[in-house]
Image (tube, rainbow, N blue to C red):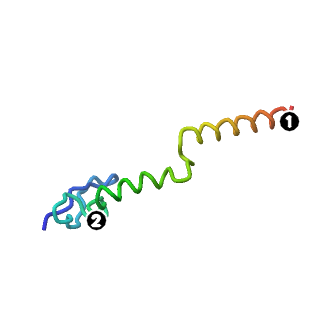
Amino acid sequence: MTQCKAKSKRSQQQCKNHAVRGRKTCRMHGGILGGKKSLEARRKAVLKHGFYTTKAINERKKVSKFYKEIKNRIEN
C-alpha cells in the first residue's frame, strides 16, 4: 500500500496513514469523497435554504448596518 501524500500544516510532516486504493491521500485527507453525485449534492445542500447566497448576505449586512445606525442615534 502507498502512503498518504498529505502534509501537516503545523509540522510539515507527511501523513503516516495508508492512501486509499487508487488515490494519493488517506480517508481523512479526502481519499474517500464519494462520486460526482455526492459532490453535487453537497453544493446543493449549502444553498438549500439560501442562507449563504450573495443576496441573503447583502440583506443581513443592510439590516446590521441599520441596527447600528439606530443604536448610535439612541445613544447620542
Count of marks, rendered view: 2
Q: Residues within 10 Å of mark 2 (few under 14, many from 20)?
A: some
Q: Which mark is residue 35?
A: none
- Residue 55, horizontal then vertical, whole percent: 58, 38
Q: Hey, what amino acid is under mark 1?
A: Glu
Disc 2 + disc 1, Cβ < 8 Å:
no
Q: Hey, what amino acid is under mark 2?
A: Arg
Q: Nearer the viewer, residue 58 or 50?
A: 50
Residue at x 50% of width, y 50% of height: 47
Q: Secondary structure at mark 1?
A: helix
Residue at x 37% of width, y 53% of height: 40
Residue at x 25% of width, y 63% of height: 26
Q: Which residue is mark 1?
A: 75
Of the two numbered discs 2 and 1 on the same chain, state the one appearing first in sequence: 2
From what the image shows, is residue 43 above or below residue 68?
below
From what the image shows, is residue 55 above or below residue 26?
above
Q: Which residue is mark 2?
A: 27
Q: Secondary structure at mark 2?
A: helix
Q: Residues within 10 Å of mark 1 (few under 14, many from 20)?
A: few
Q: CA distance from mark 2 to mark 1?
A: 54 Å
Q: Nearer the viewer, mark 2 or mark 1?
A: 2
Residue at x 65% of width, y 41% of height: 60
Q: On the picture, is 10 further left or further right than 24?
A: right
- Residue 63, horizontal then vertical, whole percent: 70, 39
- Residue 31, horizontal then vertical, whole percent: 26, 61
Q: On the picture, is 68 further left or further right than 26?
A: right
Q: On the picture, is 55 further left or further right than 71?
A: left
Name the image quarter holding the N terminus: bottom left
Name the image quarter holding the C terminus: top right
